[in-house]
Amino acid sequence: MEIATYAIEAEVEATHWWFAGRRRLFAREIDKTGLPRTSRVLDVGTSTGANLRLLRDLGFHAVEGLDFSNEAIRYCRDKGLGLVRYGDVRSMPFADESFDLLLATDIIEHVDDDIGALRQLNRALKPGGHLLVTVPAFPSLWGLQDKVSHHKRRYRLLGLKAKVEAAGFTVERRYYFNFILFAPIFLARQIIRIAGLDNRLKSENEVHSAGINSILMPIFALDTRLAPMLRLPFGVSILMLARK
């Protein structure tokens, strides 16, 4: 991810509708696993610490992070979000079967060999442990955020499920989310591209204000409540909970 993008994310992630809504969604999925708060947890690809904030607020005590950006690690340290090691999802510096829960949220789309990355995650997870993974969905939604985040691809649900299973996991839950805003986001990305704004903006998160946040926060909160129940065939992102 570009350095300017880290700076913007670090500034907004605590209150931005997208980050706040995702944390609530992830919290509900993690609670469903029944994991005790003493479980060892790893957030792979911490970026500026959104998931570390979530895990702290949920009461987990044995939490580590991993990121290959020193800039991201610095932001996490400055926020007091705990230990974050330098490393790559493709060759993680952890012993086999080290963790009870792994979070890999918007990570595997960054690497060429996504199945290889998933196998590394499987290696580091204890038998019976859980993996929470999210990815951006639908190639037709490719836009500025994919570009500045250095994404390699966007996914479809069945394609992701096949890759997760090929890496040795059993998929327990899977669905698209952020479906209510699917059409507006698609349209906005086309406008940004056609107007040439993708060469002027550093991140879509720059398009942010208290007014926009107050409108989108309840919409996304409703979305993340309904998505696991409705399981509609579209959405801006995919969530998958798998077990080793």
Image: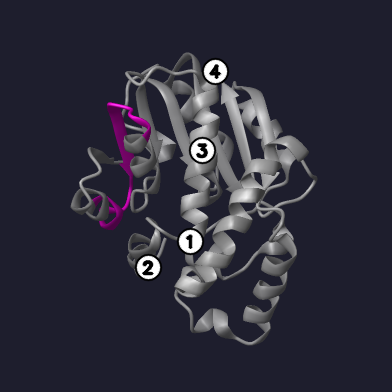
87 vs 227, left or right, is left
Q: Quadrant of residue 233?
A: top right
Whether residue 118 is in magenta: the answer is no
12 vs 122, left or right, is left
Q: Give me the residue at 46% from left, 51% from top.
A: 20
Q: Give me the residue at 52% from left, 82% from top.
A: 199
2 or 3: tag closer to the N-terminus: 2
**Separation of residues labelled 2 and 4 (CA atoms):** 35 Å
Q: Check if mark 3's residue and mark 1's residue have beta carbons within 8 Å.
A: no
2 or 1: tag closer to the N-terminus: 2
3 or 4: tag closer to the N-terminus: 3
3 or 1: tag closer to the N-terminus: 3
Q: Which residue is mark 3?
A: 26
Q: How far across and down, in percent of the image, does residue 18 sit?
A: 52, 56
| Image disc number at residue 149 | 1
| Image disc number at residue 8 | 2
